[in-house]
């Protein structure tokens, strides 16, 4: 665990200020535009405060922040996890299912071109026509296993797996989702850098659970109960040994503490009204695959061998 903390590169997060965040349409069971409209100003102010709290927590854990410029009329642009899948300085831009969110695609594309111009990513590519993949919301990097877990069933196509395997040259494990409340993989699944996996079993099909159980040893499984699942405790951001989330039960906090993790709670209930929380509001830009990681940490070792 010490190695994990000391070898970690500076985490870099893409986020978007919730200036224009609101619930104005409904594309998942959490979104109720009427309930939002009834108290819109108060809820918007709360979202702004809660997002500032998340940004502070990310910075306090050692994260560096990059931002997407907010746009009127794009209330879900705050969920930058959905912008792209990023690994080894390459970004595969999202292709959204719903027209409401397809309008975000050119904004995220321009943001990634700007990151490329600044030298923060090397390649920016698009998903093929007709294949939907809602970015890291449905495609989670598992550092300890050096693979992507990829979700499908509500938003992203199962065929996206082959695109991701081809683009990044790493394996993908497909997980079909079963409960519309957990419509993106990151709402019910979180792979921690130590190999532990937080997941809500009822969100998955029987076939998906078999895949999880085949790849995650029992000692590494942290199964959430419904109470933690519905507050999106699995929608967490891990930075070294800190796990940032909106809230969780004492039992979950203890289970994580036993494994050496500290939970940093930062309330994000305003975003749960849109079906999102900590992980959805962030996108890691600095993940590297095992091959690239060992090439970067041991350049001397490899040149010695070559000499
Ligand atoms: N309202 C947004 C949607 O339904 C929430 C997206 C949450 N993002 C995530 N990565 N789970 O698309």
Image: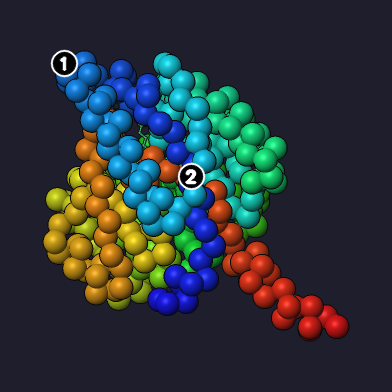
Direction from residue 91 to residue 303 in the image, left or right? right
Residue 94 drawn at (x, y percent): 53, 35
Residue 255 drawn at (x, y percent): 22, 69
Direction from residue 236 to residue 265 in the image, left or right? left
| Element on which disc 2 rests | strand
Q: Nearer the viewer, residue 164 or 235?
A: 235
Q: Is residue 62 above or below residue 120?
A: below
Q: Which residue is mark 1?
A: 38
Q: Which mark is residue 266?
A: none
Q: Looking at the image, can residue 293 be seen?
A: yes
The residue that appears at 26% across and 67% down in the rendered structure is 256
Q: Is residue 235 above or below residue 28?
A: below
Say how many tags the image has.
Answer: 2
The residue that appears at 28% across and 65% down in the rendered structure is 262
The disc, 2 or 1, on the residue closer to the chain's N-terminal end is: 1
Q: Which residue is mark 2?
A: 65
Q: Looking at the image, can residue 128 be seen?
A: no
Quarter holding the C terminus? bottom right
Marks 2 and 1, how far apart at CA: 33 Å
């Amino acid at each position: 665990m010490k190695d994990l903390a000391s070898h970690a590169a500076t985490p870099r997060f893409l986020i978007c200020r919730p200036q224009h965040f609101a619930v104005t349409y409904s594309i998942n069971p959490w979104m109720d535009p009427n309930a939002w409209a009834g108290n819109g100003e108060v809820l918007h102010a709360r979202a702004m405060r809660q997002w500032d709290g998340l940004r502070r927590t990310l910075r306090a854990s050692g994260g560096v922040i990059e931002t997407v410029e907010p746009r009127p009329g794009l209330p879900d642009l705050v969920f930058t996890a959905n912008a792209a899948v990023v690994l080894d300085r390459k970004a595969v831009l999202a292709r959204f299912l719903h027209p409401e969110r397809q309008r975000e695609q050119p904004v995220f594309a321009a943001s990634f071109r700007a990151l490329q111009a600044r030298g923060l990513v090397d390649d920016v590519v698009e998903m093929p026509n007709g294949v939907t993949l809602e970015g890291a919301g449905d495609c989670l990097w598992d550092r300890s296993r050096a693979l992507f877990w990829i979700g499908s069933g509500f938003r992203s196509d199962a065929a996206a797996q082959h695109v991701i395997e081809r683009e990044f040259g790493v394996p993908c494990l497909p997980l079909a989702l079963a409960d519309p409340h957990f419509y993106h993989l990151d709402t019910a699944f979180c792979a921690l850098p130590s190999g532990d996996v937080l997941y809500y079993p009822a969100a998955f099909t029987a076939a998906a659970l078999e895949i999880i159980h085949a790849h995650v040893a029992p000692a590494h499984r942290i199964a959430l109960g419904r109470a933690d699942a519905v507050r999106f405790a699995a929608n967490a951001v891990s930075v070294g040994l800190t796990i940032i989330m909106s809230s969780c039960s004492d039992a979950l906090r203890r289970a994580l503490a036993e494994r050496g993790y500290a939970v940093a709670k930062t309330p994000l209930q305003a975003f749960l009204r849109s079906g999102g929380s900590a992980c959805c509001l962030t996108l890691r830009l600095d993940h590297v695959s095992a091959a690239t990681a060992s090439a970067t940490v041991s350049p001397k070792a490899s040149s010695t061998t070559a000499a």
